[in-house]
Each structure stands twice: as structure tokens, then as C-alpha cells.
């Protein structure tokens, strides 16, 4: 019995020592990162920062946190923020945002509220903290801008996974976005729905794709220059709003100067109204919107169906084609 007690004490002391070493290392790493950001010209301030969770967790808790990159023109402020991890699995982090926080750009300040906003991040075991997978889920999300606008979603989720298949190019990631019961800003909705026939909320919007970049998403992508997208494989693009229904898929490369090169198949019901929505939301460049309107109108007229269409768009040499007919410039990503 005495030997068992001794063993328990030794294990307890060893584990406690490991926890102290681990929490000290984590606290030092975060404080060093914030100091490096300040040296790089950022604002990185926190009222209180501590690591808790003995004996099985490394939980980093921030109070009155402010991060800002003046060169990029953004500021994020949160009264509380948490990074939670198991002590025996420190590369898997749960991020927990507060019920209310704000994100500012040079043009607007957006207040973000939700009943739940948390994410799961798993990093590869390397010093660059390369992202292996990320999942973000939120409920009762509301975005309110100082420019007198508000948008909300009952539920939304985002997933971003490093693609490890040997047949895929390096730095490829699976991306999935889903939003349910999304309510766009009233002024935006009124500008495209002057007759008031569309519902106040968009029941479902889904985007499922593989994105390829020129560099990996890791800590250098945040601290320095973001990776540039070089290709996109769209498996499922789905948008449902009243009678408007859009489905699409395609395989597109992005040239060094930012132009799309590839194909995209589009199926749309009530395409005229749907295109008005896309144009009003400024989701497409104005020149491409005009060209797409002209091309789709031609296809719909030839098909004898003015409302529902299925077309294959081809992007080549900075132009957009329907079949062999150029209809205008290709979209430019950057």
C-alpha cells in the first residue's frame, strides 16, 4: 500500500510539473507573438491574459482583447475570448467568441452578436502551425453596421480542411459553407425586390468546393501576405430564395494576373430575377455582369424558355464564352 501511495504521488507531481511547464510555454508563446505583432506595427493589447485548466487542459483566456493591423485597415475587439485545448493534445484548439464583439474596417464597424460562435482548429505538428482543418459554427448570428444595416442567420457553418489526397495539387483545401434562414439587409433586399414578392429570409445557401493556393495557410499567412488562390473546383453551389433557384458546378484555374480560365455549368430558375440579385449584391464585376446578362438572354431566347436555363460558361484568354461565342470579359479575382 505504501508503494502504491508513493507511485500515485510521483505520478501526480510529474503531471503537475508537466502542466506547469506546458502552461508557461503556452503563455510565453502567445505573449511573444503579441509582442512580435506590435513590433510589426500592429495593435495587440489585452487587459488580462491567463492560462488555466489544471489538470487536463491548457485554456487561454483573454479579457478586453484588441487586435489591429493598421496597414490592412482592420480592428477586432472582444470583451472576452478563449482558446481551449487538452493538455495532451495541444495542437487541437477550440476557439470561443463572446456573445458580442466588433470588427472594423476603414469604412464601417460591424457589431457581431450570437448565442453561440465557436470554432475547432487542428494544426499540423510543425513550427509554422500549418492548418490541417478548421470548423466554425454559429447560431442566432446578427451583423449590425454603423452604416445603418443589419443581416442575420439562424444557423451558419464553415469547414476548411487541408486536402491530403496524392492526386491533388499542394496547398489544396476543401471548403464548405452553409447558411440557413439568412436575412440580408433591408435596404439591399428592397433594392432588388421592389415589388416585395420575395421572403424576408433566404432559406438555404450552400457552397462546396476545393480551393488551391500558391502557399499554405499557416501562421505566416496571417502575419505576412495571404496566400493567393490559383484554382477552384466547385462541386455544389446552391441558392434558394422564394422562386429563385440556382445550382452550379465547375472547374476553374486562376491565372497569375487574376483571370478565370475554365468552365462553369449553371442551372437557374427565374434567372432574370436571380441575376438582378447577384448584380445588386455586387458579387460579379460590372463588365462581366453585363456580358452574362446579354449571353444568358440569348440562350434563353433560343431555348424558348425565358425563365429556366442551363448553360455552360467557358473562360479563356480573359474572355467568357457560351459555346464558341464570346459574350464579354472573363471575371477577375484579383
Image: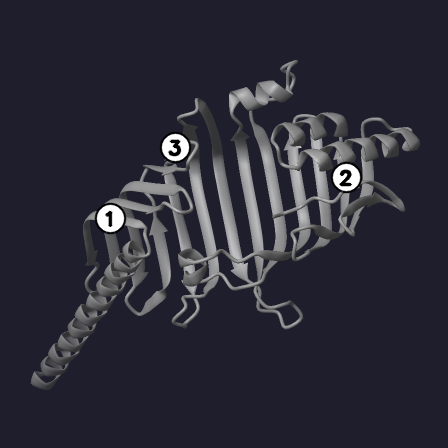
Q: Residue at x 61, y 48 (%)?
A: 334
Residue 76's tag is none
* Residue sitting farthest toward the left: 2
Image coords of residue 63 (percent x, y): 22, 45
Residue 112 vs residue 108, the one in the foreground: 108
Image coords of residue 256 (percent x, y): 65, 57
Can you tell which of label 2 and label 1 is closer to the viewer? 1
The crowd level at tag 1 (other Cα within 10 Å; few <14, some 14-19, many 20+) is: some
Can residue 56 be seen here? The reply is no
Q: Secondary structure at mark 1?
A: strand
User: Up-down: is 95 above or below 92?
Assistant: above
Residue 45's tag is 1
Image coords of residue 160 (percent x, y): 52, 55
Q: Residue at x 53, y 20 (%)?
A: 187
State the image quarter where residue 66 is shown: top left
Protein image colouring = one colour
Can residue 293 be seen here? The reply is yes
In this image, 227 relative to 7: left or right? right
Q: In the rendered image, which residue does mark 3 sit on?
A: 109
Can you tell which of label 2 and label 3 is closer to the viewer? 3
Quadrant location, the N terminus: bottom left
* Residue sitting farthest toward the top: 195
Image coords of residue 24 (percent x, y): 19, 66
Mark 1 → mark 3, Cα distance in angstroms: 19 Å
Mark 2 → mark 1, Cα distance in angstroms: 49 Å
The crowd level at tag 2 (other Cα within 10 Å; few <14, some 14-19, many 20+) is: some
Q: Secondary structure at mark 2?
A: strand
Residue 56 vs residue 301, the one in the foreground: 301
Mark 2 → mark 3, Cα distance in angstroms: 36 Å
Q: Secondary structure at mark 3?
A: strand
In this image, 26 relative to 129: left or right? left
Q: In the rendered image, which residue does mark 2 sit on?
A: 267
Amino acid at each position: 500500500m505504501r508503494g502504491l501511495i508513493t507511485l500515485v504521488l510521483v505520478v501526480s507531481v510529474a503531471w503537475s510539473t508537466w502542466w506547469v511547464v506546458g502552461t508557461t510555454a503556452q503563455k510565453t508563446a502567445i505573449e511573444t507573438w503579441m509582442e512580435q505583432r506590435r513590433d510589426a506595427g500592429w495593435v495587440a493589447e489585452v487587459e488580462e491574459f491567463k492560462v488555466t485548466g489544471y489538470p487536463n487542459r491548457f485554456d487561454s483566456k483573454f479579457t478586453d482583447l484588441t487586435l489591429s493591423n493598421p496597414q490592412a485597415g482592420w480592428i477586432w475587439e472582444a470583451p472576452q475570448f478563449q482558446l481551449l485545448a487538452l493538455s495532451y493534445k495541444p495542437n487541437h484548439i477550440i476557439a470561443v467568441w463572446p456573445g458580442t464583439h466588433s470588427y472594423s474596417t476603414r469604412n464601417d464597424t460591424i457589431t457581431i452578436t450570437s448565442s453561440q460562435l465557436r470554432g475547432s482548429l487542428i494544426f499540423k505538428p510543425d513550427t509554422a502551425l500549418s492548418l490541417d482543418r478548421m470548423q466554425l459554427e454559429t447560431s442566432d448570428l446578427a451583423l449590425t453596421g454603423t452604416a445603418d444595416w443589419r443581416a442575420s442567420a439562424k444557423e451558419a457553418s464553415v469547414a476548411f480542411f487541408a486536402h491530403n489526397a496524392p492526386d491533388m495539387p499542394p496547398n489544396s483545401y476543401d471548403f464548405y459553407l452553409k447558411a440557413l434562414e439568412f436575412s440580408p439587409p433591408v435596404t439591399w433586399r428592397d433594392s432588388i425586390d421592389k415589388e416585395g414578392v420575395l421572403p424576408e429570409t433566404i432559406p438555404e445557401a450552400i457552397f462546396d468546393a476545393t480551393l488551391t493556393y500558391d502557399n499554405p495557410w499557416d501562421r505566416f499567412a496571417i502575419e505576412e501576405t495571404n496566400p493567393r488562390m490559383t484554382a477552384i473546383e466547385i462541386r455544389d453551389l446552391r441558392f434558394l430564395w422564394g422562386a429563385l433557384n440556382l445550382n452550379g458546378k465547375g472547374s476553374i484555374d486562376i491565372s497569375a494576373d487574376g483571370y478565370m480560365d475554365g468552365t462553369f455549368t449553371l442551372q437557374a430558375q427565374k434567372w432574370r430575377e436571380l441575376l438582378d440579385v447577384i448584380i445588386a449584391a455586387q458579387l460579379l464585376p460590372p463588365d462581366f455582369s453585363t456580358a452574362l446578362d446579354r449571353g444568358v438572354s440569348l440562350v434563353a431566347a433560343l431555348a424558348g424558355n425565358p425563365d429556366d436555363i442551363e448553360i455552360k460558361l467557358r473562360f479563356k484568354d480573359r474572355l467568357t464564352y457560351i459555346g464558341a461565342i464570346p459574350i464579354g470579359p472573363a471575371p477577375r479575382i484579383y
